[in-house]
Image (cartoon, helix red, strand yellow):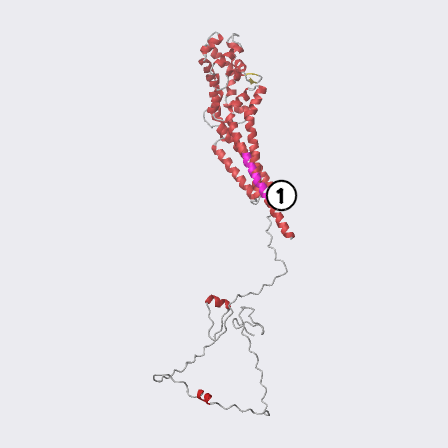
Amino acid sequence: MICVSCGSKIDDDSRFCEKCGAKQPELAAPEIPLPEADLSAPVIPEAPETPEKKEEKAAPEKAPSGPEEKKPEPVKPAPQPVAEAPLYNDQMSAGYSQPAGGYTPYNGPVYEPAPEVSEEAPPLPPPAAAPSKVGAGKLIAAWFISLLAIIVLTVLSLAFSVKLGVTGSYVRRSIEGMTADSVLGADVNGESLSDNIYKGLGFDDISHGMVDRFAFRDFMTRTDFLSFTGKKIAGYVDCIIGGSEQDPSVSESEIIGFFENNAELSEKCFGYKLQTLDYNNMRRNLEKENFVYKASLAGLSDAAGTPLQNLCYIFSYITLGILLALLLVLLIWIAVVTDRRGKYIVGSYGKILIWSGIIVLAVALAASAGTSIIYVLTGWFEFYVAASVLLPFAAFAGVIGLFEIILGLVFRKIRKSIRARERRDSAIEKALAEH
């Protein structure tokens, strides 16, 4: 049997189409043949017609009045061809109307056949490809690069702190603010600074034993010794750190000029005024002790084993820029070596910052509290001066060191979060694989 709506083949006894749901016409009952007439049966004659029935069969009724009108013959409709009915969905969308002579389509809801349910579980999505592991060789290379980066960052931080905190003007103000008696009483080579100057100038011979070391120290505390010393040391700082081309070395003329400017004070302290002969004897004793050379930049460089004036290149802004560029290259290199894996990158950066910050902070504490403690324990002049002069440097280095440590801890926290997320994703993938 063929559906009248969609043309699909359906069972002969189906009332509705399984595809489009259209109702199918009922099949006409088969005709049952009548039995043949029995000719042997008697024939019953029809009843005669009455006069009334004859009149009813007479001519048709006429109009009551008016001329006779000829009735028009009824027009028989022309047979319409039966068009093929479209599908039910097309009827609904196009507003299809069933042509005359066709079958009325089923306008009820269309029930799609239920999809066959497969007893097999749907396939799981393919697991995400696990990131490739970084080899041990690459990790060792990253560790070596991180070590170089720690050194570069530490040098950069300390050099920047020195550049900002150690200046000639500040050193001069720091020395001028010290106590003269404390400076002169500081230990230098096992003796006080005042006694070293007293012996170096030969004041005992110059004064013919009339001026002892106590009177000389009292004289020195009343002079502008701190101002003179601060000015000369500021020149050394500007040359070694600031890169000044002027030679800061102290000369014999400057030392003798210091005593000449305080000649009137010497008369009050010693009981007599220093004369030209006394100044010549001072000059001769200075040459004998080679004091001027030892205090010059060349003598200090020989004692240190390196030209101190070349240290200015380390603290120049050009060098600081080069160190910063080198540090950035090392950081990029670490990212390349570790295949740009986030946890290795932030882990290495965190170690670099933390270790560099610890070293810089330790140097800052040593430059401030450490020098003061050592001076209290030993009384050495060098640590007394360092404790006062290096305070700005210690402040800058301490701030930079703390900042690096805090930033390094932030990187470590990021690394822990990345590792936790990776472990969580791995556990989820393992659970899905087991099910």
Mark 1, residue position: 136
Query: Is residue 407 shown to the viewer in this render?
Result: yes
Instruction: Please tell me which residue lies in front, 127 or 357.
Output: 127
Q: Residue furthest left?
A: 66
Q: Residue furthest front?
A: 51
Query: Is residue 248 shown to the viewer in this render?
Result: no
Q: Is residue 329 above or below residue 307?
A: below
**Residue at image coords 49%, 22%:** 174
Secondary structure predominantly adopted by residues drawn in magenta: helix
- Packing grade of label 1 (10 A; few <14, some 14-19, many >=20) is few
Q: On the picture, is 47 further left or further right than 65?
A: right
- Extent of the magenta region: 404-420
Q: Mark 1: which amino acid? A: Ala
Residue 413: say if magenta.
yes
Residue 325 position, x and y percent, is 50, 38
Residue 319 position, x and y percent, is 49, 33
Residue 9 position, x and y percent, is 56, 72
The quadrant of the image that shows the N terminus is bottom right
**Secondary-structure class at tag 1:** helix
Residue 59 position, x and y percent, is 41, 88
How many numbered marks appear? 1
Instruction: Please tell me which residue lies in front, 224 or 97.
Output: 97
Residue 244: say if magenta.
no
Q: Is residue 373 above or below residue 333?
A: above
Q: Is residue 203 above or below residue 145?
A: above
**Residue at image coords 47%, 22%:** 173
Instruction: Please tell me which residue lies in front, 126 or 424.
Output: 424
